[in-house]
Image: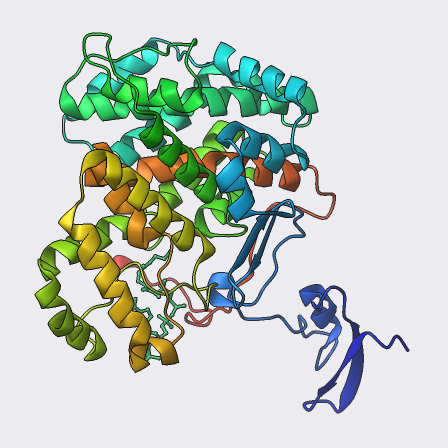
């Protein structure tokens, strides 16, 4: 009998079963043998929202929510954010190792070569209303890219998959910037391939008359934010990319599913809600009243709490530092002072201590994006730009994982039992 096992007794039959434990998990399929009769389908697990189900093995991102640890391929997020670049991080997530200088140059060159999008994309953009939400625009045009690259369907070929990875990494900033300018009625600014990844994106969003004075501090701040968002293991949008990609559809379609998932207010949209909350609080004097209303159950302290982190979200710590760098450039935003005081008061309050509620990634990021000149409904687009390498690395890992099949959960049927059809005149 293996020692690493779980003994289960089915009290319906009195039978006992020995289930192997591997990596702290039991296989849900091992429960299928537990039956009350030969006709019985066998036991399943019931786990709405996958609260306690590992759906894959992954070597990409490690999170310890109690200790507040986040690592990409073993590298602490703090070190990558402080010393790394976004493209290095994207390479690391995909390949598992940091690139050599030559590998990084080759990767950056491949991306630079693919930044342009087919001009027909502009016709799609013109079809969107002037006030179209940029996330709706983005998910539409990324999905449309699949029709421009029918070769992307050949997902069994590693070289082909790499080409699509490069295309998506290269074109998402261009499409995101086009969506930004569409909302302003500004002419689209095409990629300048003499600029770096971040510089090119910022230039495509803010350049007027072909001119934009780059601010290195703000660009580095944006790069850090993108690094901090690059992956977060099996979150809602990554799970969407994996589930949709498991049908073996092309990666443009799978990534557009990820963008759709991120669009939702429970996922990518919380940083918008933080800004609305700070507006409502208005001044530091309004904080105690607001905290009392949250404790009474009238709404939540937005940007606080996390499903996985039950201590300070390591990304929030780094973002708070970035906020001060940014505000040194742009001038202090009184909302930052409200946010800092709000955080201090909440962290000392029994209600938040007892529930292990700490600031999450969204608490300070919205303030930074706003200071950079991005409007509130654009924040989630910036999140998508950051998360893309994670989606692509997780997609690659899923496609090459021999244990994966098309995602197809089971259900517990709760509808009516079989009954005869009744013609409409007799109903
Ligand atoms: C992120 C979030 C959805 C995680 O939720 P969760 O793990 O399912 O936690 P629960 O909703 O079960 O909350 C547990 C308890 O903490 C309270 N709580 C959780 N987040 C809270 C918040 N931000 N403000 C006030 N109370 C909060 C709940 O009311 C609940 O209290 P109770 O036990 O007295 O009923 C939740 O913390 C939240 O809504 N935060 C605000 C939105 C946000 O910032 N989202 C971005 C996430 S990156």
Residue at image point 49% right, 35% down: 254
Residue 7 picture quarter: bottom right
For the residue pair 271 and 228, the one nearer the viewer reads as 228
**Is 188 placed above or below 376 here?**
above
Q: Could you tell me residue 337's position as x and y percent?
A: 19, 55
Residue 335 vs residue 252: left or right?
left
Q: Quadrant of the N terminus?
A: bottom right
Residue 213 picture quarter: top left
**Residue 427 seen in the current view:** no
Residue at image point 23% right, 54% down: 274
**Is 189 placed above or below 254 here?**
above
Give ligand 1's quarter of the image. Answer: bottom left
Q: Could you tell me residue 350's position as x and y percent?
A: 31, 82
For the residue pair 339 and 197, the one nearer the viewer reads as 339
For the residue pair 224 and 186, the one nearer the viewer reads as 224
**Is 401 placed above or below 180 here?**
below
Residue 276 vs residue 413: left or right?
left
């Amino acid at each position: 009998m293996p020692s690493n096992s779980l003994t289960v007794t089915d009290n319906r039959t009195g039978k006992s079963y020995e289930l192997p434990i591997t990596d702290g998990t039991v296989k849900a399929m091992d429960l299928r043998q537990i039956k009350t009769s030969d006709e019985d389908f066998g036991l399943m697990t019931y786990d709405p929202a996958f609260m306690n189900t590992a759906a894959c093995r992954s070597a990409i991102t490690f999170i310890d929510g109690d200790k507040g640890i986040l690592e990409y391929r073993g590298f602490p997020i703090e070190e990558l954010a402080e010393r790394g670049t976004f493209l290095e991080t994207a390479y690391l997530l995909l390949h598992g190792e940091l690139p050599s200088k030559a590998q990084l140059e080759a990767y950056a060159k491949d991306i630079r070569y693919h930044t342009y999008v087919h001009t027909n994309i502009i016709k799609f953009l013109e079809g969107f209303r002037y006030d179209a939400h940029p996330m709706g625009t983005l998910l539409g045009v990324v999905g449309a890219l699949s029709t421009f690259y029918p070769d992307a369907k050949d997902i069994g070929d590693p070289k082909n998959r790499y080409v699509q990875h490069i295309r998506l990494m290269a074109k998402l900033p261009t499409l995101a910037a086009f969506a930004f300018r569409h909302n302003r009625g500004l002419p689209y600014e095409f990629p300048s391939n003499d600029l770096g990844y971040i510089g090119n994106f910022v230039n495509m969003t803010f350049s007027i008359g072909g001119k934009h004075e780059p601010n290195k501090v703000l660009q580095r701040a944006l790069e850090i934010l993108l690094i901090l968002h690059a992956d977060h293991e099996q979150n809602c949008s990554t799970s969407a990319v994996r589930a949709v990609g498991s049908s073996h559809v092309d990666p443009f379609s799978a990534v557009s599913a990820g963008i759709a998932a991120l669009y939702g207010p429970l996922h990518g949209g919380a940083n918008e809600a933080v800004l609305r909350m700070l507006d409502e609080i208005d001044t530091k004097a309004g904080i105690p009243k607001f905290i009392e209303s949250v404790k009474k159950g009238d709404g939540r302290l937005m940007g606080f709490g996390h499903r996985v982190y039950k201590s300070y979200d390591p990304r929030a710590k780094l973002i708070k530092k970035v906020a001060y760098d940014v505000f040194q450039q742009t001038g202090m935003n009184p909302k930052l002072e409200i946010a800092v005081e709000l955080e201090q008061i909440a962290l000392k309050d029994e209600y938040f201590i007892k529930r292990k509620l700490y600031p999450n990634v969204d608490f300070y990021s919205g303030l930074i994006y706003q200071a950079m000149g991005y409007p509130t409904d654009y924040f989630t687009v910036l999140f998508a730009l950051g998360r893309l390498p994670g989606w692509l690395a997780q997609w690659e890992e899923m496609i090459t994982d021999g244990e994966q099949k098309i995602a197809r959960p089971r259900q517990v049927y709760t509808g009516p039992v079989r009954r005869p059809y009744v013609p409409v005149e007799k109903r």
